[in-house]
Amino acid sequence: KNEVEQSPQNLTAQEGEFITINCSYSVGISALHWLQQHPGGGIVSLFMLSSGKKKHGRLIATINIQEKHSSLHITASHPRDSAVYICAVPPTGNQFYFGTGTSLTVIP
Amino acid sequence: NAGVTQTPKFQVLKTGQSMTLQCAQDMNHNSMYWYRQDPGMGLRLIYYSASEGTTDKGEVPNGYNVSRLNKREFSLRLESAAPSQTSVYFCASSRDYKGEQFFGPGTRLTVL
C-alpha cells in the first residue's frame, strides 16, 4: 500500500501546453511538499503548502486537505520543465512518505 | 551560501570495503536526513537527525550508521559495503523536523 500516489506516472506534452500532475495521500498531514528532480539527478524544492494555492513563476500548486489531494500545474510548458516531479508529505514519527514521481517530457 | 553539500560525488567500492559519505549544510537547519534512491523506486529514508545530538532510524537503516557531528554536519557510514547498497545517496536538511527539505547534489555509489 502506497500512502502517496501520483498520477500520471509519465507525461509527454508539447511546448506551451498546460500541465497538471496530481498527488493523493492517505495519511493525515498538515502540509505537502513538491520536489523537482532534474535529468542530471539534482532535487530542488518547489513548494511546501498547507492550504489553498501557491504560485511561483509558471508553477502553481494547490492543496485540498479535506480531500487529501494536491495538484501541481505548469502553465506554458517549456522543454526545460522536463524533469521528474515528486510529492511528499512531512514525517510522522520516522515514517516519511514520498510519491514515486511523475516523469514529464516537454517536446519543442 | 552553498546550501547542502555532499562528498564525494562518485565512488566505486569493492564488496566489504567501508566508506563515509559526508554532508554539510550552511543554512543553520536543525534537522538532517540521509536517503537512498534506486531505479524505479522513490526516495527512501535511511537515517535522520531531527536535531543536533539525536539520530533515528528510517525505513532502510540496515548496513548503515550515522553521526551528527555538529549542527552543520551529518555523515553516513557503510561499514562493510554490499552490492545491494549500490544507489544514489542524497542528504537533505530542513529548518525543523517537518519542514521544507533542501537536498544536496547526491553521491552515486557503486559496490562491485
Image (cartoon, coloured by chain):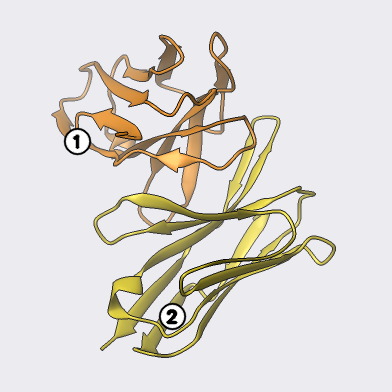
Structural crowding at the residue carrying mark 1, measured as other residues with C-alpha within 10 Å and reported as few (<14), some (14–19) or many (≥20): some
Determine the CA span between mark 1 and mark 2: 30 Å
Indicate which disc residue A14 carries.
none
Q: Residue at x 29, y 86 (%)?
A: A107
Q: Which chain is yellow?
A: A
In the figure, B34 relative to B36: above or below?
A: above
Q: Which chain is orange?
A: B
Residue closest to the eye, A28 or B17:
A28
Question: Callout 2, which amino acid?
Answer: Leu
Question: Callout 1, which amino acid?
Answer: Lys
Structural crowding at the residue carrying mark 2, measured as other residues with C-alpha within 10 Å and reported as few (<14), some (14–19) or many (≥20): some
- Residue of label 2: A11
Point out residue B49 in the picture as x, y percentages from the top left corner. Answer: 54, 21
Q: Quadrant of residue A94?
A: top right
SS assignment at label 1? loop
- Residue of label 1: B9
Residue closest to the eye, B11 or A79:
A79
In the figure, A19 relative to A34: above or below?
A: below
Residue closest to the eye, B36 or A56:
A56
Q: Residue at x 37, y 48 (%)?
A: B38
Residue A1 appears anywhere in the view = no
Q: Is residue A56 left or right of residue A4?
A: left
Point out residue A81 in the picture as x, y percentages from the top left corner. Answer: 35, 72
Q: Quadrant of residue A38?
A: bottom left
**Label pair 1/2, CB-CB below 8 angstroms:** no
In the figure, B64 relative to A11: above or below?
A: above
SS assignment at label 2? strand
Query: Do marks 1 and 2 share a chain?
Result: no
